Amino acid sequence: MQLYEATRSLLPATMCCLYLAVPLTGHCQVYVGSAVSGGAVTLSNFQSIDAPELLLPAIVEFAPVKPGVVKAETRQIASIPAKAERLRGLIESVAGTVNVAPRLIHAVISAESNYEPKAVSPRGAIGLMQLMPATARRFGVNDPFVEKDNVFAGASYLKWLMGYFEGDVELVLAAYNAGEQAVVKAGRKVPQYPETQAYVRRIMADLRSTGALPL
């Protein structure tokens, strides 16, 4: 199909207008040929004897760019191990009573006893939160093997440490592991004990991975 004919004198303007008129999403190509007589040129969208020369190549299609849908970053919900499910309700209840983040209690229990309520360390730390007998008595617990009492005393100690160290979670964890006086003697820094350093790193990594920080 021929597009149209134009006089040779109008060819430059025609070429310009035609190029601008072709949409970016079109595939049209234009061929041109000069008539033997009459000074006219032939423009066609296909090659023929009358229009053998390519004037405008097919326009490369540019697909429209759709604005991307940016999803808001979802903070990861703090998860707990499957073996801790049995204790979820107890821990959340104690956390609400003491006003300590449940995830902090979970992280400490995981590091201290791996959720074993009858665990006893070589140093005499007892139960889920590995309470020393003196710490248990300090927070009114007579039998640290009682799960609820053990968690209550451990959470109460964490709460006290949060106030004493002004919410510095690393110092709170270091004090829970080594004692608050060890942290004070270290200049209110994590003491240079390999066990305590590893303990703090482990729990901080746990809290960060579950999106529990800041507490």
Image (cartoon, rainbow, N blue to C red):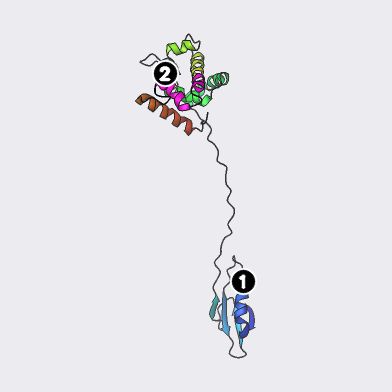
Which residue is identified by label 2?
181
Label 2 packing within 10 angstroms: few (<14), some (14-19), many (20+)? few
Which of the image's four quarters has the N terminus?
bottom right
The residue positioned 46% from the left and 12% from the top of the image is 136
* Magenta: main secondary structure: helix
- Disc 2 element: helix
Image disc number at residue 45: none
Highlighted range, magenta: 158-185
Q: On the rendered structure, is 195 left or right of 40?
A: left
Q: Position of residue 188 (x, y in %)?
A: 43, 24
Q: Position of residue 126 (x, y in %)?
A: 42, 14
Image disc number at residue 20: 1
Check residue 167 for magenta coloring: yes
Check residue 135 for magenta coloring: no
Label 1 packing within 10 angstroms: few (<14), some (14-19), many (20+)? few
Badge 2 amino acid: Gln
Badge 1 amino acid: Leu
Mark before the other along the chain sequence, 2 or 1? 1
